[in-house]
């Protein structure tokens, strides 16, 4: 039997609202989302590689995505092209649907394991904020149409 991604298991409105609680945090540019530690030579020939540490709120947000069934496993690899188009400014966020957003978050979090700093890059490029804003629009559209 061929298993499809968990796209058919949609998060509930309550789960989406929990995720949207982080929107004001990502909208505030004054927040310290992460800290970057560059290469550092400790002794000759002993170098600490560069790495990122994320704020407790960013870490909580990532856990919230996981806890509230927002991530898709396995994610649709076509979303990778959309993500890089978003980074380059070639794609409008209003073109994203909920599944696109879920796939892109899933890709970014998975990419962090293989290439440290992908979450920081997405935050720096405003991807997290814009996707949360789009998610908020989608939820409002759903609510209006269900009334």
Image (cartoon, rainbow, N blue to C red):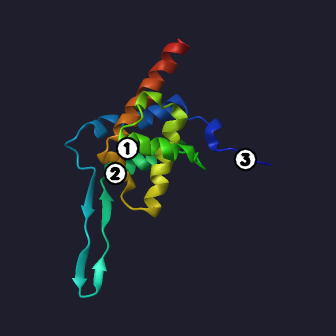
Q: Give the class, few, some or many, for how many residues have Cα within 10 Å of label 2's Cα (few <14, many ≥20).
A: some
Q: How many numbered badges does the structure rendering display?
A: 3
* Residue 16 on image: x %, y %: 48, 33
Q: Earlier in the sequence, mark 3 or mark 2?
A: 3
The residue pinned by badge 3 equals 3
| Of labels 3 and 2, the one closer to you | 2
Q: Residue furthest left?
A: 30
Rendered image quadrant of residue 72: top right
Picture disc at residue 121: 2
Q: Is residue 97 above or below residue 50?
A: above
Q: Which residue position is annotated with label 1?
A: 87
- Residue at left 30%, top 40%? 26
Q: Residue at 26% of width from left, 72% of height from top? A: 39
* Left/right of residue 61 with respect to residue 16 in the rendered view: left
Query: Answer yes or no: do the residues labelled 2 and 1 have beta carbons within 8 Å?
Result: yes
Mark 3 touches mark 2? (CB < 8 Å): no
Per the image, label 3 sits on a secondary structure element best described as loop
Disc 1 vs disc 3: which is toward the camera? 1
- Image coordinates of residue 129 in percent, x first then y, are 34, 37
Q: Secondary structure at mark 2?
A: helix
Q: Mark 3 or mark 1, which is nearer the start of the sequence?
A: 3
* Residue 97 seen from this side: yes
- Is residue 68 visible in the rendered image? The answer is no
43 displayed left or right of 61: left
Q: CA distance from mark 1 to mark 3?
A: 30 Å
Can you give x and y, in whole percent of width and height, for residue 61 in the image?
39, 46
Question: What label sits on residue 23 in the rendered view?
Answer: none
């Amino acid at each position: 039997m061929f298993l499809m991604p968990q796209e058919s298991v949609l998060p509930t409105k309550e789960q989406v609202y929990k995720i949207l609680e982080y929107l004001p945090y990502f909208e505030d540019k004054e927040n310290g989302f992460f800290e970057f530690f560059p290469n550092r030579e400790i002794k000759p020939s002993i170098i600490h590689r560069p790495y990122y540490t994320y704020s407790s709120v960013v870490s909580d947000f990532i856990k919230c995505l996981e806890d509230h069934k927002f991530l898709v496993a396995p994610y649709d690899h076509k979303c990778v092209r959309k993500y890089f188009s978003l980074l380059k400014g070639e794609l409008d966020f209003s073109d994203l649907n909920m599944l696109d957003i879920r796939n892109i978050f899933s890709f970014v979090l998975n990419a962090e394991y293989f290439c440290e700093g992908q979450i920081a890059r997405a935050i720096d490029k405003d991807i997290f904020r814009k996707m949360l804003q789009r998610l908020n629009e989608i939820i409002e559209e759903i609510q209006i149409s269900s009334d």
